[in-house]
Amino acid sequence: MEGPRRTGRRPGKPDTRAEVLDAARVVFVEEGFHKATIRGIARRAQIDPALVHRWYGDKRSLFLAAVRLDFDPDRVLQHLQAGGTDHLGPRLALAALSAWESPIAQAWLEMVRANPALLPSMVGFLNEPMT
């Protein structure tokens, strides 16, 4: 039997926002966008769902935040530059296919398929400069 639900900050100094995004990535990959819920993500991150709503608003905004932080352009560029110009084309193709076939990309595609109105915001996100 569980005790009373604790509110407020957890003990210590955890990076709760990062934990929420990590939990969101896992839940979106495991359950897909439509089956994932804010409550399920909050449960996995061991926080109150109200906190997720406060930080990210709705499920769509949380999803966009989760996939944005899942991509590290510096790491991809380092990988592409590692072998110089020899075989750059195949390395670029492999990097693109790896990103396209990743579980988070599949969740993203599912979201766009089910909600075509989101496509302009997704395209806008992809075209934003990476800083």
Image (cartoon, rainbow, N blue to C red):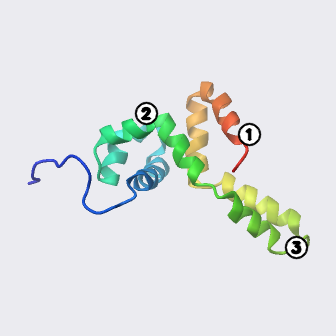
> What is the distance, in whole Å, between disc 3 and disc 1 at their CAs?
26 Å
- Does the residue at mark 3 contact the one at mark 2 (Cβ under 8 Å)? no
Q: What residue is pinned by disc 2?
A: 57
The single residue placed furthest to the right in the displayed view is 86
Which of 66 and 14 lies nearest the eye of the viewer? 14
**Residue sitting at 37 percent across and 47 percent down?**
41
Gap between marks 2 and 1, in whole Å?
23 Å
**Of callouts 3 and 2, which one flags the residue occurring earlier in the amino acid sequence?**
2
Query: Which residue type carries mark 2?
Result: Gly
Residue type for callout 1: Asn
Label 3 SS: loop
Q: Is residue 87 left or right of residue 125?
A: right
Q: Which residue is mark 1?
A: 127
Q: Residue drawn at (82%, 69%), measured in percent from left and top? A: 81
- Report the disc number at residue 84: 3
Q: Residue at x 57, y 28 (%)?
A: 115
SS at badge 2: loop
- Kindly identify the amino acid type of the residue bearing the numbered disc 3: Gly
- Residue 96 position, x and y percent, is 75, 56
Which residue lies at the image location 48% right of the left edge and 41% below the top edge? 62
**What's the distance in space between the residues labelled 3 and 2, CA to CA?**
43 Å
